[in-house]
Image: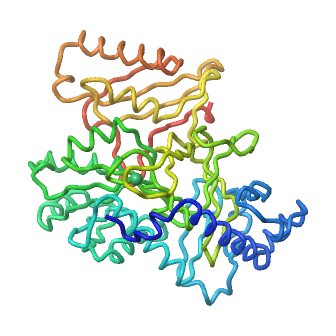
Amino acid sequence: MMYDVEMETLPREDLEALQLRRLKQAVERAYYNVPFYRSQFDELGIHPEHIKRLSDVAYLPLTEKQDLRNNYPFGLFAVPRENVVRIHASSGTTGKATVVGYTKRDVKNWAQLMARSFMAAGVTRRDTVHNAYGYGLFTGGLGAHYGAEELGATILPVSGGGTKRQVMLLHDFKPTVISCTPSYALHLADVAQATGIDFKDLSLHTGIFGAEPWTNELRAELQTKLNINALDIYGNSEVMGPGLAMECLTAQQGLHIWEDHFLPEIIDPETKEPLPYGEAGELVLTTLTKEAQPLIRYRTRDLTRLMPIPCRCGRTHLRMDKVLGRSDDMLIIRGVNVFPSQIESILLETEGVAPHYQLILRREASMDTLEVQVEVNENIFSDEIKHLQRLERKLKNNIKEFLGVTADIKLVEPQTISRSEGKAKRIVDQRQKD
Ligand SMILES: [Zn+2]
C-alpha cells in the first residue's frame, strides 16, 4: 500500500530529472533570498546557474547546525515573515536553539510525507494512532499528528509523560499503532506489566519508532515484548522533522528517503569529501521543496550509508541504512571509536540482560574508562552471585572481542536506570569535570 503510488514508484530517470529541476529552484531560492547563502556562494565563486547536473551539488557549501545558531532566530528564512505559518525549534544542550520555519505548503508537504511514511509501515485510515511524541516546539508530536490526519487515521494526541495514564489509554481506547521513541515504548511496556497489563493483550499491531538511533536487536526485543511490527522512521528537526525517510513493512531493511523532496549525500565527516553508495559516513541533506527555510547540504551528523539496491516493495526511492549513531555521540575510548549502538547490540544478544543501559565515561589518572551499567532480568538478579559474575565476564569479553575496548560491567537491579519519556540518555560523560 502506498500513499502516493505515482511518486513513490517513479522510475529513477524521471525521479532524478525531477530532483535536478527542483535542486536548481532550491539553490536559486536560497541564493536570492537568504543573505547567508548568497555570501557563502559568492565566497566560493558559485552561482545558481552553475548547477547543471545532480552531482554538481558537491560544489555547494555545506550548512552546519552552527550556521542556524549564528542566524538565530529568523535569519535563514527565504520568505517574508507573514508567509511563515509555523515555527519549530529544538533546544540545544548548549547555546541558542535552532529555529525552523514553514510556509503553508511546507506544512502540507510535511503532512503528506508523514502520511507516506505511516502507510509504508502498513498503517491505513482504519487505524488509531497513539502519538506519544512530545507536542510543542519539538517537531515529533505535531509532525506525526498532521501525517496521521492527512492519511485519515484517528490520532490520539497523547504527547509525552504521564506514563500510567498512557497505559490506561492504550487499554481503553484500543489504538492499533503507537509512535514514540523505542526506549519509551519499552518503558511503557514495563509500566503496563507492573499494573497487570500485558502489551500482548492490547490492540497494537505496529510501532513507528524514531528520534534516537536503535538497533535491529532492539527491534527483535520490541517485536516480541509488544507483539507488534517495529518500524524505523527517520527525521531531522532542522531539515523538516520526522518523515524524511521510512522503513517499509515489506522489506524492513533500510529506510526509503523521500527523494522528490530531499537530495541525500554521504560524506566523510573528517575530509567532507562525498563517498560512494554503500560506504558509511555522514548523511547530508539538501531540501528540494522547502520554501520558508531551504537548507543546502545540511550536515545531519547522523552516520549511515545509502543502499541503491531496488527494494521488493516497488518504491524507487533510495534507502539509507539504520542510523549507526551520531558523529557527536561517537565515543573515543583510549583511541578506539565506539558507538553506543554497537554496545547495545552486544548487550541485547546476551541472555538475561534487559534493554536498559547507560554508558559512564570517566577519566582516571589521565586514562579514559568506560563503565557499562546494564539491568538484568528479575530471575537472573535473584540468582547466585557466581552466575552474575559469569554474566559480567561474558559481557566484558564480548565487548573487548568485538569492539576492542575494555569496559567495566556493572549489572544492576531491574528498574534502576532512570527512564526517559523522550530520548533516552545513554551516555553520562564525567570526563570534563575531572
Ligand atoms: Zn521498500
Residue 86 percent location from the top left of the image: 53, 80
Vertical arrangement, residue 254 with respect to residue 403, above or below: below
Vertical arrangement, residue 68 with respect to residue 228, above or below: below
Vertical arrangement, residue 295 with respect to residue 75, above or below: above
Q: Residue at x 50, y 61 (%)?
A: 244
Image quadrant containing the C terminus: top right
Q: Residue at x 75, y 44 (%)?
A: 273
Q: Residue at x 41, y 17 (%)?
A: 398
Q: Is residue 93 left or right of residue 242?
A: right
Q: Is residue 33 left or right of residue 395?
A: right
Residue 431 percent location from the top left of the image: 60, 32
Vertical arrangement, residue 223 with respect to residue 49, above or below: above
Q: Residue at x 52, y 41 (%)?
A: 325
283, 168: nearer the viewer? 283
324, 152: nearer the viewer? 152
Residue 302 percent location from the top left of the image: 57, 47
Residue 214 percent location from the top left of the image: 41, 43
